[in-house]
Image: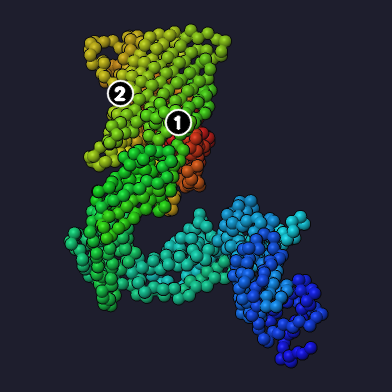
Amino acid sequence: MKTNKNLSLQLYISKAQMKSLAVLFLAIVFSTVSSGATVRDTIPNNNILIDYSNPKEYVIGGVNVSGIKYISPEQIVSITGLSVGEKITIPGDDVSSIIKRIWMQRFFSDVGMYVDSIKRDTVYLNIFLQERPRVVRWDFEGVRSGERKDLEEKLKLRRGSELSDYIISSSKDVIRRHFVEKGFLQAEVSVRQEVDSLISNGVRVTFVVNKNSRVKIQRINFSGNENIRSRKLSSAMKKTNDRRILNLLKTKKFNEKEFENDKRLMLQKYSERGFRDARIVRDSIYYMRDGRLGIDIEVEEGKQYFFRNITWTGNSIYSADMLNAILRIEKGDIYDVVSMEKRLFDAEDGNVSKMYRDQGYLFFRVMPVEKAIVGDSVDVEMRMFEGKPAIFNRIIINGNNVTNERVIRRELYTRPGYLFSQTHLERSLRELATVGHFDPEKLMSPSGYSVIPNESASTVDISYNLEEKSNSQFEIAGGWGGNTFVGTLGISFNNFSLKKVPNKKAWRPVPLGDGQQLAIRFQTNGTYYTALSLSFMEPWLFGNKPTSFSLSTYYTRQTNSYYFYQNTDQSMEVYGFALGLGTRLKWPDNLFVLYNELSVQSYKLKDWQYYFIFKDGISNNLSWKIRLQRNSTDQPIYPRSGSDFSLGLQFTPPYSWFRSSNTDYANMPDNEKYKWIEYHKWTFKANTFNKLIGDLVLMTRAQFGYLGYYTRALGYSPFEGFILGGDGMSGYNTYGSETIGLRGYPNNSLTPRLNNSYAGNVYDKFTLEVRYPLVLQPQSTIYALLFLEGGNSWSDIRDFNPFQIKRSAGFGVRVLLPIVGMLGIDWGYGFDPVENKSKGGSNFHFVIGQQF
């Protein structure tokens, strides 16, 4: 046998045992493949020689894949590119390339390529693979259940997937960053792997999290700030706050991304003061003690600049004088770039961009350029491109699974062929948000709509991305009123479709989609009290005009039978019917609505000796109601801006004017005196909503009501008065009075009494309420509130004093669930005397609906 002295490795293969022997091309593999692919040698006792210094070309006779369980051999062969009949050089680059391709799949912890046998010029290859372990279970240690859920959603790890160093490393990084963003800057993550005893090649992986203590910012120190106080700079930083008293309600955790953004906001504060060259020289972050962070920021302010000359170029629609009037910047004003850009680009009323976009100039652009800087003065040139007016092209509706498309389109002010208007787009969003069928939070967010411009065609497509929400409500409740417990069962469908009633397929469970409202309500405590009401409302009676039509009827029966075994010979029955029309006005603007209603009510008494002015007879109430309302709130559930004003008048015919002037009302029987009830009732309600910080909202409310008479000798009507105090949910009342809640006092306690009956003929009420949302989702809306409230009631307008009010303060929470409506609980404390008490004291109030 001859051997070559230059060979680094010789391999002999036995002819008799060729199928059981293999050769690993060790030098080639280790020169091209990263560590992790293991090798094996088998050196048999025979005299067949493979010369590694003299590569030889072979024909592939077969390829076998061994060691795999989850991946098919055909898939591996396809990765290698090998096929029977093709030629391969051994040893050579082909082998190293094949092993590298397999290794790059990251599925295997061990890759080996063997020669099973050689027959003349034909080679039979075997690829041995060791698959990475499969994860039987992913687990977390040291985290709460809510945190576990958040991590699972972020990591999206699957059981049965292969385990690799990359997955371990990247998952640890995601987990640590998750807790760092929550203020746990010193969080540590380790991994524990355990071999599964039941599943072959299976492992259980546990991420062990040690959050350590939450790191909070103790102090932010500013230096170099001579013109702006540290307190102002600190307040400019929205998410990076220290423990000073002004940041009492703000988070103190440190977030690196937010810190970078807050540094830019801090420099904006300098830009607002004209310090255009202000910059941060350095900043440092350090631990003051365990869990407490210190931040030092050094600034270089530079000098203060002022506006000198402002010129406009490219403007043809509006003159420079008109644009300057909108910009509201005079020569010598502080060079406030932030305010200048807001007045140029913000979509608010009275700004340049909004003015152009409302005239259709969607493609309008303006670029302020510093033309010259002389000393501390800056000349600015406004370079404008007005472009052509854009036309609405396609109006696309997405996400309306229940509501008919025509119901949506009739609310829109953006219509194909019309000139583009930013105001019309915003108004359309508001109308869709207030209609009640869609999630207003998503609709008013950037994802709720899309503006798709086509500048070459001067058109724009608008896409409304809606998310339907359930707004039908089921009511089951109990309340205390009239010295008895009253149970209530009601259901209302706020997206009903009367047209689909004959269609059997539409009953799932009821016909929906046309925006109509149908409500049925039933109240009872047994034989003593029963009430039934039914109402229907069509918001667009004539299809193409927003004229609402409403119809309601109700029936109430009350007896002297507190218990089922008592007789019911004594009774009072009330029948009622109302028909209303509401019309949206065009003047003073199209936010005004004029509502008219005709109502008929009849009281029928039979030997009734309880809480009424006569025992036997019939009393009728025929009235006309007029209400003028302007509502500009951005949404009905949790409004952040806008207002709601209404002025109402309800009146009956002046029957007493047609009687003799000598009529003796003092001696007239009550059943004759009030056979036809007469009054005129005035109401005024005003609500405003203003965003304070973020979603923190200030709500203010003022209310006034007056029940007047036509003839002094007849006096005030005992019907349709005002009952003030408490939660505004007194179950039922006898004379059709309007119940007004005032928290901090017992129910009805602020209402004057005459002859053992309530006689609230005048009232006022004022509310100041701060609201903050806890949950804003289609499934539920939850917000907390603090309130100051005051009001009072008088029996005669001559005694009215708007400053003689009963005051209270407290807090509460509201929960809106689509299936049941608004629920709430308030605690109020009344500060003033009431009903022989020195003060109203502490009172809890349970709320169903929007009483307050």
Q: Is residue 650 visible?
A: no
Q: Nearer the viewer, residue 425 or 639?
A: 425
Residue at x-position 25% and y-position 72%:
379
Q: Position of residue 614 (x, y in %)?
A: 40, 11
Q: Nearer the viewer, mark 2 or mark 1?
A: 1
The chosen color scheme is rainbow
Of labels 2 and 1, earlier in sequence is 1
Quarter of the image for residue 125 reads bottom right
Q: Amino acid at mark 2?
A: Leu
Up-down relation of residue 660 to residue 797 (above or below):
above
**319 left or right of 692?**
left
Viewer-proximal residue, 435 or 727?
435
Looking at the rendered structure, the secondary structure element under dot 2 is strand
Amino acid carrying mark 1 in the image: Lys
Q: Which residue is mark 2?
A: 598
Location of residue 440 with respect to 683 vertically, above or below:
below
Task: Judge the density around disc 2: few (<14), some (14-19), many (≥20) Cα neighbours within 10 Å.
Answer: some
Q: Quadrant of the N terminus?
A: bottom right
Foreground pick, 694 / 312:
312
Residue under the point 69% across and 63% down = 68
Q: Eyeballing the image, is 273 above or below 95?
A: above
Point out the image quarter for the C terminus.
top left
Q: Position of residue 65 (x, y in %)?
A: 68, 66
**Element under label 1?**
helix
- Disc 2/disc 1 C-alpha distance (Å): 36 Å
Q: How would you rate the neighbour count of disc 1 (Cα within 10 Å): few for under 14, some for 14-19, many for 20 or more?
A: few
Which quarter of the figure has residue 197?
Answer: bottom right
What residue is shown with label 1? 505
